Image (spheres, rainbow, N blue to C red):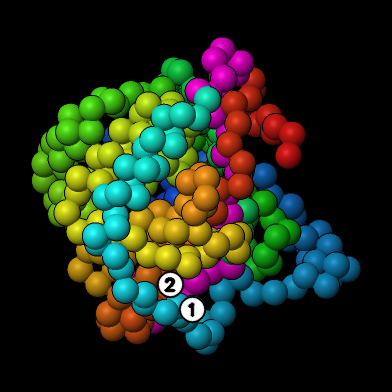
Amino acid sequence: MTEPSAPPVAALPAVRRQALRHHLLTEVRRPSRRPRRVRVLVPVSAALAVAVTAGMITQPWAPDSAPVVVPVAQGERVGATPLLNRMAVAAAAKPAPPAGTGGYVYIRSRGAFAELGEGPARLRPVHEREIWIPRDERGDGLLRQPFFDAPIVGVIPERETLTDVTPNAARVDLPDDPDALLAKLYAEREQRGRGSSRDGAAFTAIGDILRESVVPPRTRAALYRAAAKMPGVEVVRGVTDAAGRRGIAVAHTERSRRDEWIFDEQTFDYLGERSYLVADTADGPAGTVLGTTAVLQRAVVAQLGQRPQR
């Protein structure tokens, strides 16, 4: 996928670019502004001492490790529309998010992403991350996840302040009519003028909203009904998210890559996402996993950095 154009900035490591592409909200950072980065680091000597004591010294990236490859199952196009419509009915019947109980949306997830562009893609370690997003008004957010640029996994944390974040309310301010919603997503793709196809861009946009937002039931139902109208959407069964939970996936393939939204097959609750190759490419053979995630907790909290009860 070709990224939207942005002002020149200092180059990020390939792994950071990939993680940001897959795992941050589409509008967490405006291209015209550089976010403040606030890292809370344990001194390296102290971190090494803790790691030795705990037996935790590991390399976060093993360049000679084999890619993670999964079977490429045949997708079911005929079943996609009725499944998404059933999911829409179930979503509309769920209770609305709590009103007026906090100023931040909190999401805890688990995931891993592959580095692309330098030989076969290999997943980095699965790690947990937390994000705090302003609920109603644009402002600062917060991201916590492992600091993978360090040589030790799980010892040196990363805390990143996200500035000028689009609030959750604006992210989910979408038409309830699926035709109008789909037209809006297509129009946004045309405004960008580059990147994936309009259906691929719309599928990605819906996935971003499902992953890191608290979505009202009617809006979630409209998202599913809009996806049901997109050509090429498929159902893939027996899919596993980054937490090992099995579910059913709604999938879309663009060129040689398949992206999946994974749901509980009984309740249709959103579980996570998975992306992998469906054909042999320079990034690896068919089935090479490019990304896997699992949403573990969603909540509304009063303060930035506050954690809900697990």
The picture places residue 42, in percent across and down from the top left corner, at 74, 52
**Quarter-wise, where is residue 138 in the image?**
top left
Residue at image point 47% right, 65% down = 239
Residues tagged 2 and 1 counted as in contact (Cβ below 8 A): yes
Residue 9 visible? The answer is no
Res. 309 mark = none
| SS of the residue under disc 1 | loop
Q: Quadrant of the N terminus?
A: bottom left
Q: Which residue is label 2 attached to?
A: 289
Over which residues does the magenta segment extend?
96-125
251 sits to left or right of 41? left
Q: Closest to the observer: 174 or 147?
A: 174
Residue at image point 43% right, 72% down = 289
**Label 1 Cα crowd, 10 Å radius (few <14 / some 14-19 / many 20+):** some
**Label 2 Cα crowd, 10 Å radius (few <14 / some 14-19 / many 20+):** many
231 sits to left or right of 28? left
Question: Is residue 124 located in the magenta-colored stretch of the structure?
Answer: yes
**Image height of 92 relative to 292, above or below:** above
The picture places residue 298, in percent across and down from the top left corner, at 58, 36
Q: Closest to the observer: 281 or 148?
A: 281
Q: Furthest-top residue in view?
A: 100
**CA distance separating discs 2 and 1:** 6 Å
The picture places residue 118, in percent across and down from the top left corner, at 36, 78
**Image height of 195 relative to 285, above or below:** above
| SS of the residue under disc 2 | strand
Res. 68 mark = 1
Q: Which amino acid type is shown beneath numbered disc 2? A: Val
114 sits to left or right of 126? left
Question: Is residue 209 located in the magenta-colored stretch of the structure?
Answer: no
Q: Closest to the observer: 226 or 171?
A: 226
Residue at image point 24% right, 60% down = 78
191 sits to left or right of 295? left
